[in-house]
Image (cartoon, grey):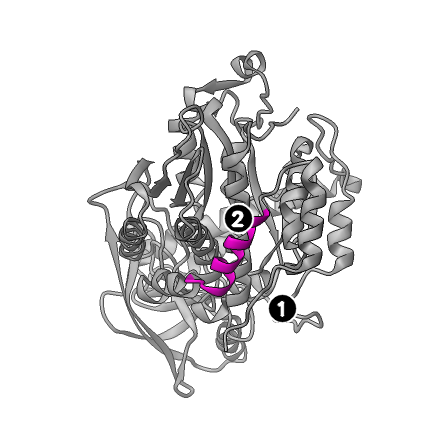
Amino acid sequence: MMKKFTFSALALGLCFSAFAQEPVNTAIVQKIRTEGLEKSKAMDIAFHITDVSGPRLSNSPGLKRAQDWAVKYMKEMGLKNVHLEAWGDFGKGWQVDKFYAATTLPYYHAIIASPKAWTPGTNGLIKSEVVLVKADTITDLAKYKGKLAGKIVILDQGTPIRSSDKPELLRSTDEQLAEMAAAQPQAAGGRPQRAAAPGGAGNNQRAAMMRQFAIRAALDSMLLAEKIGLKLTQARGSYGTFFTSNGASYKLDAKPVSPELEVAGEDYLHILRLLRGGEKVEMEADIKTSFYDKDPKGYNVIGEIPGTDPKLKDEIVMLGGHYDSWHAGTGATDNAAGSTVMIEAMRILKAIDFKPKRTIRIALWSSEEQGLFGSRGYVAEHFGTPASPARPATATTPEIAAKELALKPGHEKLSAYYNLDNGTGTIRGVYLQGNAAVKDIFQSWLTPFEDLGAKTITIGNTGGTDHLAYDAIGLPGFQFIQDPMDYNTRTHHSNMDTYDRLVEDDLKKSATIVASFVYHTSERAEKLPRKQ
């Protein structure tokens, strides 16, 4: 039986009491809640993004499949101006076509691992003794020259696995949310100062890191010159969950690297213990990867519900999330969840036959994982760029903007951008990103959803995702507060980031809240205020 969420009398009363601060259309909120909580298509959307499309590494065939599906789905939904829009040059795509690895001596054991992104394959099945390489200095590498061709190599380095006594799946507590709500704004331009390390410890640490980088660079050069068969590295994580990364550059002119396998901690340390104990270890591996360089451009998926008010239809309300993922899982919580919520929010608004005053535009960004490239490219094309990329702008008037920013006419047309990119956890509130002027507005808009646990407003911000591209040029860009769930402990960039980690009720709630925020933003008499 489908669980239904009802619009409580308390929430309704609270909603009416907020009218003096910011109007809330309770009738429309009820329609949005009914459609979003009782008729949701979120899990079907997520199924197509993850299980059907697969991993969505930047410029990979999986991302292209997901983008093509999104374009088709948005058109079927009735969105207008649906298209793939290039944001600039990215580089080459990559995918795993085949992967198998196992130890065969002292006994057979299949290994939990993944090829590192943008690394080559093994050119067929290789069988090799595993060679332990120990190098504390660059000169230590000389003894391995001429001995590693075709070998599987492991470094004499390993990080022990420690069991945690903390829960892996978390919901935000009332105390934590209250602490966020009580946060105070920083002084203009203020940044926390780092305490100096006593006794020159900071310089010593930097010197040690530089030495390690030099040794690692020399080692990688030697392994490439030796034409090794495969390099094993330990992935972060435990209990068979591992967090993946890239082992080479995606640039078209990237330097060649050796085949590299990122191995789950338990399997890596198992091999390392055997070799350190003097036991012989043999492995076999068959890895095939493909590169895609015919079209190096990156693309975002764009779609709209056109505005209908003659005076306001050229103004824009945007919502979005990044669509790309890493490759060891299917990118369910990072960030099919956020993309699903935003697509579902648009579906809800279409399903209630909403005719907005302002144009509502959705964007599914690509290459967020490599540096917010999709959103930054889009913002640069449509709204402007920071005059100083190292200093986020806080332009609020044309005079200030002229000094701080290289703006485009579209800058004045955007009311707000809403982003979601912190896993499957339900929305609990909003980060104001330092914009105190929207606090009361957002508090009123959250009031109808207090029964869903969404009530927290914090002046603080969260980083690392696409709303920053908007904030950097003084536009109102917001990320929602979400329950952490197991995002940081189990799914973020991991092999376990799959459809099964999505929580249906959370996605329903989030899509409903986003749809209401977008609705009210589109219908305001004025655009949302910007930072002062």
Residue 367 painted magenta: no
Which amino acid type is marked by label 2?
Ile
Residue 256 vs residue 339: left or right? left
Q: Which mark is residue 169?
A: 1
Foreground mark, 1 or 2? 2
Q: Residues within 10 Å of mark 2 (few under 14, many from 20)?
A: some
Which amino acid type is marked by label 1?
Leu
Q: Which residue is mark 2?
A: 28
Task: Tell me: residue 307, above or below residue 503.
Answer: above
- Quarter of the image that includes the C terminus: top right
CA distance separating discs 1 and 2: 34 Å
Which of the pair 354/237 is nearer the observer?
354
Q: Secondary structure at mark 2?
A: helix
**Does label 1 or label 2 sit earlier along the sequence?**
2
Residue 101 vs residue 291: left or right? right
Q: Residue at x 44, y 53 (%)?
A: 348
